[in-house]
Amino acid sequence: MDTPEACLDRIRDAWNNADAEAYGAEFEEDATYVAWSGELQHGRQRIVEGHAEIFSKWLDGKKMRVTPIRKVQLSETSAVFTTVGGLGAEDTPHDKFQTFTFVRRGQRWFCTAYQNTKMDESAKVMFNAPHL
């Protein structure tokens, strides 16, 4: 059975494989995606297009590191995860907070809304402790 955690794993795997189509497939058709820069991407197709550009221009082997710090199951068909993340080598420090809103459609989970925000310096210290 699919889970929100499995959807998050597929998102990470698609990023790490620089596969914009697989990345976009994990988002609903009308999903919203707010990048750390404040750019809004609306809809799966725009998410695919935006990430194809990202992966081809500046990804350069950078891997996604994402660690859930809070999971809230709102219902049998919706969940919200707060995560910390970073891009780079395996041991890259966390430098962003993300919020993923997941919904289940049939037997499959998708991300319907995503928000990515830069951490301040105190959060970087707190969320890069060895226990993460």
Image: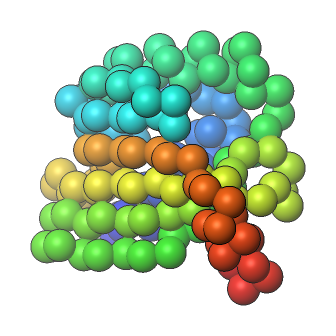
Rendered residue at 82%/34% (across/down): 61
Residue 9 visible? The answer is no
Front position in the image: 39 or 56: 39
In depth, the one of 129 and 1 nearer the eye is 129
Q: Quadrant of residue 106?
A: bottom left
Q: Residue at x 18, y 51 (%)?
A: 105
Image quadrant holding the C terminus, namely bottom right
- Give the vertical position of 124 relative to 132 (above or below): above
Q: Quadrant of residue 121?
A: bottom right
> On the picture, is 69 further left or further right than 93?
left
Q: Is residue 83 visible?
A: yes
Residue depicted at x 26% and y 66%: 79
Q: In the visual, does 49 lie left or right of 127?
A: left
Q: Position of residue 64 (x, y in %)?
A: 68, 48
Count up the numbered dots: 0
Q: Residue furthest bottom?
A: 131
Above/below status of 74 relative to 27: below
Q: Position of residue 41 (x, y in %)?
A: 36, 24
